[in-house]
Image (cartoon, helix red, strand yellow):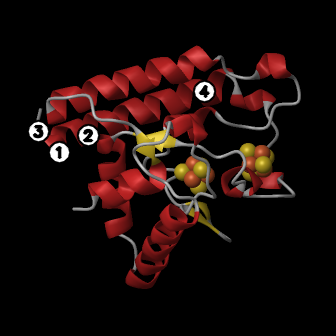
Amino acid sequence: MAEKKALTRLRKMQLEFAASIRESYERKAASCLTCTTPGACCLDAHFVNVHISRLEATAIVTTLAEMPEPMRERVSARIDETIAKYNLDDTTEIHDQKYACPLFEKGTGCLVHTTGKPVACTVHACYEDPADVPPDELQFEQERRIDRLNELTYRRSEPWLPLPLAIRRAKI
Ligand code: SF4
Ligand code: SF4
């Protein structure tokens, strides 16, 4: 599949998935709009281990490319600093690699909130009752669907990488 077509399909999948999580689960979670520690979830280097595929990284790179230059340069520097600071690489087990996310912009929030939020971030919210948390299988199934789209696009299932590293590798 041509990458452009795959990116369009990915966006549709992301929007549908986000809508279903919002509809079925998020209303039971604390509101991010009134959060007293906004970004705590994205900047906690003991917690964040978001990993993404090549196609998702390409979509994020496209979003970054459309930003005003000063912001793009700031985010790009943060990505490099994050990779170096947390020793992110493609040899360590991805779930063990944790970092403060460079896509969190103070005063703005997640820079890809509406244009390509990773699956793990879409399912995450602060729930008081653990019974209200979306089941892990929803995330895994969505990641499998995205993986298949990667295979159709790049002819092989790409390794999923820590987000900063995946963005750097996808640089176009
Ligand atoms: S997910 Fe939780 S910590 Fe993060 S902004 Fe929302 S309410 Fe705050
Ligand atoms: S991609 Fe966005 S939501 Fe996910 S950790 Fe980074 S800033 Fe937070």
121 to the left or right of 60: right
Q: Quadrant of residue 38?
A: bottom right
18 to the left or right of 5: right
Q: Position of residue 60 (x, y in %)?
A: 38, 54
Q: CA distance from mark 3 to mark 2?
A: 10 Å
Q: Residue at x 72, y 54 (%)?
A: 44
**Amino acid of disc 3:** Ala
> Of helix, strand and loop, which one carries label 2?
helix
Rendered image: mark on residue 4: 1
Q: CA distance from mark 1 to mark 2?
A: 6 Å
Mark 2 sits on what residue? 8
Q: Residue furthest bottom?
A: 70
Mark 4 sits on what residue? 21
| Total numbered labels | 4
The answer to whether residue 134 is above or below residue 116 is above
Give yes or no for contact between labels 1 and 2 (Cβ–Cβ under 8 Å). yes
- Marked residue nearer the N-terminal end (4 or 3): 3
- Marked residue nearer the N-terminal end (2 or 4): 2
> Of helix, strand and loop, which one carries label 4?
helix
The answer to whether residue 106 is above or below residue 150 is below
Q: Residue at x 30, y 43 (%)?
A: 54
Mark 3 sits on what residue? 2
**Amino acid of disc 4:** Ile
Q: Is there any visible trace of residue 12 in the rendered image?
A: yes
- Marked residue nearer the N-terminal end (1 or 4): 1
Q: Quadrant of residue 142?
A: top left
Give the number of the mark in front: 4 or 3: 3
